[in-house]
Image (tube, rainbow, N blue to C red):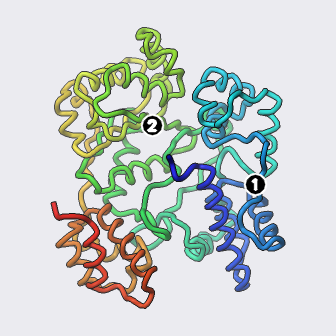
Amino acid sequence: MSLSSPSRDRALARQAIVRRLLSLDETGTLQTVHVRIAAETTGVHVRTVWRWLAAAKESGRVEPVPRRGVFALDDVLWTRLGELGGNVKALYRWMGEHADDVLAGLGRDRLPSLTTLHDAVHRAQRAGRVLEVSRPSYARLDPQGYDRALAELALPGTIDEAGQAAVEPALQDDPDSSDAAGTSPFTDGVRLYVPGAHVVSTKQLGAVTEAIAHTIAARGVVCVYGDPGQGKTVAVHQALRLLPRRIPVHHARVAVKPALPQLRAALLTAFGLPATALTNRTDAADRALLEAFQAPGVLVIDDVQRIAAPELDYLRLLADAPTTQTSLVLCGAGAERTLARAPALASRVLTWQQVPRLETAQVPGVLHLFHPLWDTATDADLLHTDETRAQGNFRTWAKITSHAYAALDRHPEHTVDAALLAQACARLGPRP
């Protein structure tokens, strides 16, 4: 049984944010910019956060009061509604076409009526839920003040190696962008293992961002490869977050060694096409995918090393069609070796981008930015741990940070020293 759900995660995020805002309000340092950042983080309107804060002050409780017996859209349906341009009737038709999956996700025995669906959408919008997360307007806000407020809230974000907030650039309003809104799943962030951690925009991550941006502009194929834990997926996430919203991003989730029907179904699902109806209709499915590839966009396949050479050749046929305008981002540990077994596809890769480990000289500075608990650690202790255990692997350092954070939480009197690092490393398992 799953221990968490999107709705539970959203409720927990609300509670954490309201607690933090209340603490700032008690010290007299709460500002409008704090509320704006909280609204962006939770994907609601600024007025909704103010209402949360007022309700918490009045009731003395930070958690929302549950409502029973009222139909509400879960995150999957809300995301699908955004992909359909906010068309509730189109969402209703889509729910009918995927009734079994929708009912299983909602835990209901029948679908709501169109009127009930309209009411649920209106109720969610009145409560402040929005289809697209708002972003700060840099024309009206001092960037230094925004960065300072971001640090004061101590919410997970991104910072570069100079310690500056690496927030997304403001996008120009495009009247056509609402009809082709981005569908990227990457804006939800990445696993950092510990509260208060940040994704650090290292020079390795910047190189991946440049490579992906160039390849997408050329509508080509890029392969991002490297050893496990070096930050490939994080780098791809960051690069795709910086794309203009009007460029749709599709993510195909593939099984281990998928057969061609399974791969075809994963691609259909990535493009929002009816996989169940088309999987066993080869000609119709191929035509649907070729039509989907005609639209400018990005198809991301992580863990591409799971796919065998014959199925990779199917990707080559789609990418090589004369009408194709969709770029391919292939990512995974050992991806370069996998593509070498499919020379027809490998020869069409425009960009090969390796994600190396952190350089030794980078380690102390990056860790100080990754999490504040390393601020008091000496460079010598960090470098020794990197040489003996982490070896420049960012995922390993994230695990060490998690164990060190837990140890300090249990024993606040301890300091971050060689003994604490040794204790954290002892939980990493046997040396390879």
Does 395 sit left or right of 53 as displayed?
Answer: left
The residue closer to the viewer here, 85 or 102, is: 102
Q: In percent of the image, x 20 and y 78: which residue is there?
A: 384
The kind of secondary structure element at disc 2 is strand
- Name the amino acid type tagged 2: His
Does 365 sit left or right of 249 as displayed?
Answer: left
Numbered badge on residue 261: none
- Give how far across and how far down residue 315 sits, in percent: 33, 25
The residue closer to the viewer here, 208 or 286, is: 286
Does 50 sit left or right of 143 as displayed?
Answer: right
The residue closer to the viewer here, 92 or 106, is: 106
Name the image quarter holding the C terminus: bottom left
- Name the amino acid type tagged 1: Pro
Residue that badge 2 annotates: 251
Instruction: Work out whether 75 lies above or below 151.
Output: above
Determine the image quadrant of residue 393: bottom left
- Give how far across and how far down residue 204 sits, in percent: 31, 58
Q: In percent of the image, x 24 and y 28: which residue is there?
A: 308
Give the farthest residue toward the bottom.
Answer: 413
How many numbered discs? 2
- Give how far across and how far down residue 162 sits, in percent: 41, 73
Q: In percent of the image, x 41 and y 11: which residue is there?
A: 282
The kind of secondary structure element at disc 1 is loop
Instruction: Work out whether 26 lies above or below 431.
Output: below
Residue that badge 1 annotates: 66
The residue closer to the viewer here, 18 or 342, is: 18
Q: In percent of the image, x 48 and y 47: which residue is there?
A: 186
Q: CA distance from mark 2 to mark 1?
A: 33 Å
Q: In front of the other: label 2 or label 1?
A: 1
Q: Earlier in the sequence, mark 2 or mark 1?
A: 1
